[in-house]
Image: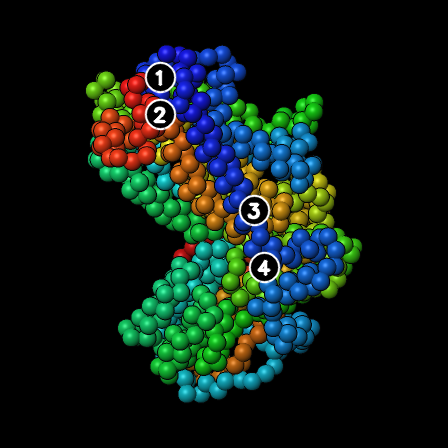
């Protein structure tokens, strides 16, 4: 009898074992076939390897935009290089004579979120810029609604501003591209100026759309740097925050294309910027074999990535992070070969300065493309010195040095 | 009656169970080990061994002692969290607040300690205190207020999540001083064979030993009895509310320790600890601990955590995209709960061959050819 009693649990236990294995196996297959990028490129140039990566990247890769941003990286910018937040690439201008106003106007700002250090830094700078314009009597007040990274919340925020906000102008930093398009169009229909910045929308109704050159430019700058500093066949670990956000996806789409063309083996992971995940992925990769490069689609978590190499006792990689202070400091401390790409944080000043121009009836660029220049090792010391005392989450190219409250407001990082 | 195994067919179900009062404590040690390995709580160790072999198979360098000890070190926070969750689950409850407790502790460590080395010890005291408070709130809410633990801990999870968001705005703040981070990142250097013995491994071993001792103490027995049948435990003289509250305190304290280790290992970020409650529950379930309480071993929960991490590493080595992890975890939870629940109940009680006495007479009255087989057994009944 006892034998029978114990046979059942064994059967179930082995079923459990098998079950666990079945899960691991069955989950392997679909990904392998869907995006066998990594595995196939690792072994050899099989025909699969040529096809599957495109499948993944094609969705976000746009040759025309890629080419445009490739050119814009070396374009001439109008305006004073001392105030890069006012610079733009020459192009179509919007006439704003109709919006000319003699009294201070109320700005309504629908913000996607302040849930990452980049947005927080920009938000602080924007508020200091606001104080300046309030003192000048250009803007009476700015009402802000934070959508907390939620499309629906932001649509509701915009509709609230349209119906009850009593706004003289709208500033919108869209949470996502497609979902926000209709709401932005509704704002345009009010006949008041609409300023869109950072992520874009699929309509050109806005008075001006402000953004740095873009994600492809980031991807080109970083991938070219890694390619120049690595040998063909070297391995790069790409750490990505999230899938599905256009500015981030474009960074990877460009980098992935270049890595492939230049024989760099790249594996990508989504980390959610969680340093635990970053460390785990890198440690696993180091366990598998040498890793010569690290590419990041945003600098958040760069320090954890470097620490993973230190803890493992491996040689430090060639690495691209971001102009976040934590990375610049760790970069200097370790002396690794690196580059800090920049997604110009000073763009957070521009929407309010655009309103100043609009209320004065001055024309503004229809698409206001701001400069976006990476920080190289040679420039690093200058930026570290200029931002001495700033917290780790601060961004070196925040562009608020001439605003009231500098540097205390940024040093204490009191988020309004 | 102890020779029941030799009797033919399914002869004496009642008699054989009556004969073995404590089935898991009889027989020699190898016999007990072999028998234990066949329960879900033991099978996880076999699973662990198989997964380990699989990982080393695909990636031999993983099996080298220095790499292995680092793997144990980095898995320590999850194993500690899983053991904390074990106390609550075996007492018949859930603790969903674990991840939020970890995130809170991580952020407090970053904000309060900062660059001030003298604050390290006060900070640890403060974090442990917060852990106890959260545990007490969870415990009393569940027992005194009679709110299901699922809801109470969901509430504390949201409340703490809000606090973290308030403190950080959802983005990373600076890391605390390196001396504090050493706890989770450093180790004893120049150890033979291993190269380095990470502090988290030492902390894990200490917590494991303490946990095993605790589960063998009267408190441990009471907690299992309470999870099995709170009414019976109460009638037997246990203070159910206090037993369960202590289980919640142990869980929050485990989350706190995991948080301290994670600050060192990874650094400060509000997303640290995200999903830990489910990872811990998955690990506990994979360790064969029965949801609903009363059954399961502490070390199996820790083994479950290691098995889970090995599986994830295996998937990494196989270049499976990390986005598949939650799916794998979800399937494991369902499979393991299904398997464990069934297996324990089979192991505990022989299947009552659906009331033989009442069903036999109607069967025998029917003029069917099957009468021949019951007939062979009627003599023994």
Q: Are marks 3 and 2 on the same chain?
A: no
- The residue to which callout 4 is attached is A34
The label on residue B350 is 2
**What is the C-alpha distance between the residues marked 4 and 1?**
55 Å
Regarding mark 3 in the picture, which secondary structure is present there?
helix
Q: Chain of mark 3?
A: A
Give the residue drawn at x 66%, y 54%. Answer: A38
Nearer to us: label 3 or label 2: 2
**x, y percentage for residue A409?**
47, 55
- The residue to which callout 1 is attached is B16
Give the residue drawn at x 46%, y 85%. Answer: A96
Give the residue drawn at x 42%, y 52%. Answer: B169
Nearer to us: label 4 or label 1: 1
- Where A280 sits versus A106, above or below? above
Please identify the quadrant where the C terminus of chain A is shown: bottom left
Regarding mark 4 in the picture, which secondary structure is present there?
helix
Give the residue drawn at x 38%, y 77%. Answer: A187
Regarding mark 1 in the picture, which secondary structure is present there?
helix
Nearer to us: label 3 or label 4: 3
Q: Are marks 1 and 2 in contact (CB under 8 Å)?
A: yes
**What is the C-alpha distance between the residues marked 2 and 4?**
47 Å
The label on residue A25 is 3
């Amino acid at each position: 009898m006892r034998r029978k009693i114990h046979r059942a649990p064994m059967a179930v236990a082995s079923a459990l074992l098998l079950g666990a294995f079945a899960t691991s196996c069955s989950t392997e297959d679909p990904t392998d076939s869907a995006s066998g990028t990594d595995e196939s490129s690792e072994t050899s140039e099989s025909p699969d390897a040529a096809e599957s990566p495109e499948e993944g990247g094609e969705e976000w890769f746009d040759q025309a935009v890629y080419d445009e941003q490739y050119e814009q990286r070396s374009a001439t910018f109008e305006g004073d290089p001392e105030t890069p937040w006012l610079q733009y690439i020459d192009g179509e201008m919007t006439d704003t004579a109709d919006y000319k106003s003699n009294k201070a106007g109320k700005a309504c700002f629908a913000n996607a979120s302040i849930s990452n250090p980049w947005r927080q830094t920009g938000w602080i700078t924007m508020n200091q810029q606001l104080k300046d314009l309030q003192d000048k009597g250009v803007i009476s007040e700015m009402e802000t609604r934070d959508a907390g990274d939620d499309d629906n919340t932001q649509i509701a925020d915009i509709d609230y501003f349209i119906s009850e906000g009593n706004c003289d102008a709208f500033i919108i930093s869209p949470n996502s591209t497609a979902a926000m398009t209709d709401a932005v169009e509704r704002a345009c229909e009010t006949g008041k100026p609409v300023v869109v910045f950072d992520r874009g929308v699929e309509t050109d109704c806005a008075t001006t759309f402000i953004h740095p050159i873009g994600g492809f430019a980031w991807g080109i700058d970083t991938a070219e740097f890694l390619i120049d500093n690595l040998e063909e066949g070297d391995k790069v670990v790409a750490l990505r925050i999230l899938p599905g956000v256009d500015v981030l996806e474009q960074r990877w789409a460009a980098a992935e294309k270049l890595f492939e063309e230049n024989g760099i083996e790249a594996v990508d992971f989504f980390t959610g910027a969680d340093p635990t995940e970053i460390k785990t992925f890198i440690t696993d990769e180091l366990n598998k074999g040498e890793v010569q490069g690290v590419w990041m689609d945003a600098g958040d978590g760069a320090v954890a990535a470097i620490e993973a190499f230190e803890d493992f006792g491996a040689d430090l990689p060639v690495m691209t992070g971001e102009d976040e202070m934590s990375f610049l400091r760790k970069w200097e401390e370790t002396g690794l070969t690196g580059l800090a790409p920049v997604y110009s944080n000073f763009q957070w000043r521009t929407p309010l300065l655009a309103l100043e121009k609009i209320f004065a009836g001055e024309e503004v660029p229809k698409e206001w493309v701001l400069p976006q220049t990476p920080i190289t090792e040679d420039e690093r010391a200058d930026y570290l010195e200029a931002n001495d005392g700033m917290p780790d989450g601060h961004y070196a190219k925040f562009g608020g040095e001439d605003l009231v409250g500098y540097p205390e407001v940024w040093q204490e990082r009191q988020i309004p | 009656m102890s020779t029941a195994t030799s009797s033919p067919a399914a002869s004496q179900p009642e008699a054989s169970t009556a004969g073995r009062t404590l089935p898991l404590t009889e027989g020699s040690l190898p016999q007990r080990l072999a028998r234990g390995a066949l329960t879900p709580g033991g099978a996880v160790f076999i699973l662990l061994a198989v997964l380990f072999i699989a990982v080393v198979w695909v990636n031999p360098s993983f099996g080298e002692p220095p790499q292995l000890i680092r793997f144990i070190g980095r898995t320590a926070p999850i194993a500690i969290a899983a053991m904390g969750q074990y106390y609550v689950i075996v007492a018949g409850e859930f603790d969903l607040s674990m991840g939020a407790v970890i995130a809170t502790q991580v952020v407090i460590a970053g904000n309060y300690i900062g660059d001030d080395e003298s604050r390290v010890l006060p900070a640890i005291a403060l974090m442990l205190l917060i852990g106890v408070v959260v545990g007490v709130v969870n415990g009393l809410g569940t027992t005194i207020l009679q709110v299901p633990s699922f809801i109470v801990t969901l509430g504390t999870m949201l409340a703490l999540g809000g606090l973290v968001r308030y403190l950080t705005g959802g983005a990373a703040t600076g890391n605390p001083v390196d001396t504090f981070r050493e706890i989770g990142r450093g180790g004893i250097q120049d150890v033979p064979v291993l190269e380095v013995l990470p502090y988290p491994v030492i902390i894990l071993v200490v917590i494991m030993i303490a946990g095993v001792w605790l589960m063998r103490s009267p408190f441990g027995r009471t907690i299992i009895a309470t999870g099995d049948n709170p009414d019976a435990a109460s009638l037997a003289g246990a203070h159910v509310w206090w037993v369960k509250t202590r289980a919640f305190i142990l869980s929050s304290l485990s989350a706190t320790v995991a948080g301290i280790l994670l600050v060192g290992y990874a650094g400060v970020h509000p997303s640290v600890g995200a999903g830990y409650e489910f990872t811990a529950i998955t690990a506990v379930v994979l360790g064969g601990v029965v949801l609903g309480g009363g059954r399961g071993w502490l070390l199996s929960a820790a083994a479950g955590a290691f098995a889970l991490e090995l599986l994830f590493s295996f998937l990494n080595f196989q270049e499976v995209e990390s986005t598949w992890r939650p799916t794998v975890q979800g399937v494991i939870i369902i499979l393991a709960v299904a398997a464990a629940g069934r297996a324990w109940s089979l192991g505990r009680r022989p299947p009552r061959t659906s009331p033989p006495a009442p069903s036999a007479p109607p069967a025998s009255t029917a003029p069917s050819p099957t009468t021949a087989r019951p007939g062979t057994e009627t003599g023994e009944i």
